[in-house]
């Protein structure tokens, strides 16, 4: 059973030209092995900058981490999402929403 936390990340307000990162935990809370088959790329200016999950088979109670970085180049409000795919029979695709505001 795949458990993803958090399911949404609000990077808040940051200055254009700077960046902020946050981690997403993917954990196998079931009783059998869970294979994470992929992590989609969110739209710019969000980027997956770390990923110990794709291609991993997590045994029960094992977890992996996806790091997402928000690095805006223009002043505006941004939103996107990324999708985590696995062999979970109930939730094979889990979406994590991303948002952030950039100021000068």
Image (spheres, rainbow, N blue to C red):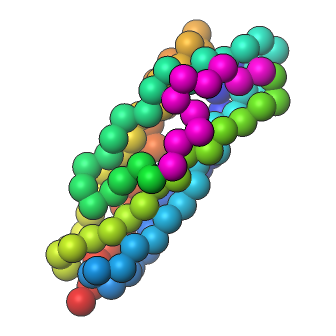
Check residue 51 for magenta coloring.
Answer: yes
**In the image: residue 12, left or right of residue 63:** left
Q: Which residues are magenta?
A: 50-59
Visible residue check, residue 50: yes
Q: In which quarter of the view is residue 30 placed?
A: top right
> Total label count?
0
**In the image: residue 12, left or right of residue 58:** left
Compared to 23, does 5 lie above or below? above
Seen as rendered, the residue at the extreme bottom is: 104
Check residue 4 for magenta coloring.
Answer: no
| Quarter of the figure that contains the N terminus | top right
**Image coords of residue 80 (percent x, y):** 31, 50
Q: Nearer the viewer, residue 23 or 88?
A: 23
**Image coords of residue 18 (percent x, y):** 36, 79
Q: Residue at x 40, y 73 (%)?
A: 19
**Image coords of residue 60 (percent x, y):** 80, 22
**In the image: residue 11, left or right of residue 31:** left
Visible residue check, residue 90: no
Q: Residue at x 51, y 49 (%)?
A: 50
Q: Residue at x 49, y 21 (%)?
A: 37
Q: In which quarter of the view is residue 100 placed?
A: bottom left
Magenta span dominant secondary structure: loop
Compared to 54, does 33 lie above or below? above
**Image coords of residue 99 (percent x, y):** 37, 61
Compared to 63, does 59 lie above or below? above
Q: Nearer the viewer, residue 80 or 20?
A: 20
């Amino acid at each position: 059973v795949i458990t993803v936390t958090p399911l949404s990340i609000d990077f808040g307000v940051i200055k254009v030209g700077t960046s902020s990162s946050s981690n997403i935990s993917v954990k196998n809370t079931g009783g059998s092995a869970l294979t994470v088959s992929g992590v989609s790329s969110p739209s710019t200016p969000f980027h997956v900058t770390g990923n110990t999950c794709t291609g991993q088979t997590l045994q029960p109670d094992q977890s992996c981490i996806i790091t997402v970085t928000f690095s805006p180049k223009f002043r505006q409000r941004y939103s996107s999402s990324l999708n985590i795919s696995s062999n979970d029979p109930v939730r094979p695709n889990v979406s994590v929403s991303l948002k952030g505001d950039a100021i000068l």
